[in-house]
Amino acid sequence: MVALFFVLVPGLTDSEENVEQVAEICETFGDAVEHIDVLGFHQLGRPKWHELRIPYPLENQKGPNAATRERVANQFKAHGFTVY
């Protein structure tokens, strides 16, 4: 059994079409998928990029709102997955 992680980044991974495509790929693993963790994007890694003097492409990226998180979780649930 495996847990899959889906990182929810507004404007990058949150479209209904993208989530459906990811869910369909996850279905190909059958019963091997124990659950899917929907992880909201955050800025906790930003200082590391600055310390390494690497341009941080997600500098102004915000995390997902509650409604988007719920919609994405429900999309995965509609495919029969347990979602955390």
Image: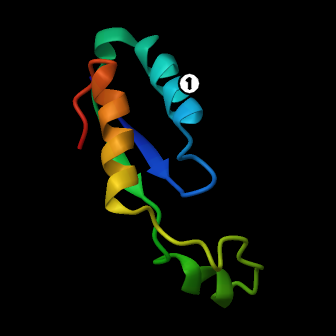
Give how far across and how far down residue 58 sits, in percent. Answer: 66, 71
Say if 79 sits above or below 52 in the image. above
Coloration mode: rainbow
Taking 4 as reference, is 44 above or below it?
below
Q: Tell me the residue that label 1 is attached to.
A: 21
Q: Amino acid at mark 1?
A: Gln
Residue drawn at the location 32% of the way across and 39% of the way down: 73
Quadrant that contains the C terminus: top left
Q: Which residue shows up at 35% across the image and 29% down it? A: 76
Residue sitting at x 34%, y 54%: 67
Percent of width and height locating residue 10: 55, 58
Q: How many marks?
A: 1
Q: Which quarter of the picture shows residue 32?
A: top left
Q: Nearer the viewer, residue 11 or 82?
A: 11
Is 62 placed left or right of 26 in the picture?
right
Q: Is residue 2 visible?
A: no
Residue 23 vs 73, above or below: the answer is: above
User: In which quadrant will I find the N terminus?
Assistant: top left
- 64 and 57: which is toward the camera: 64
In this image, 26 relative to 13: left or right?
A: left
Quadrant of residue 34 within the rendered picture: top left
Q: Position of residue 12 (x, y in %)?
A: 63, 51
Residue occupying the far front of the picture: 67
Mark 1 packing: few (<14 Cα in 10 Å), some, or many (20+)?
A: few
SS category of the residue bearing label 1: helix
Where does the image place residue 77, in percent across and percent down from the top left?
A: 28, 27
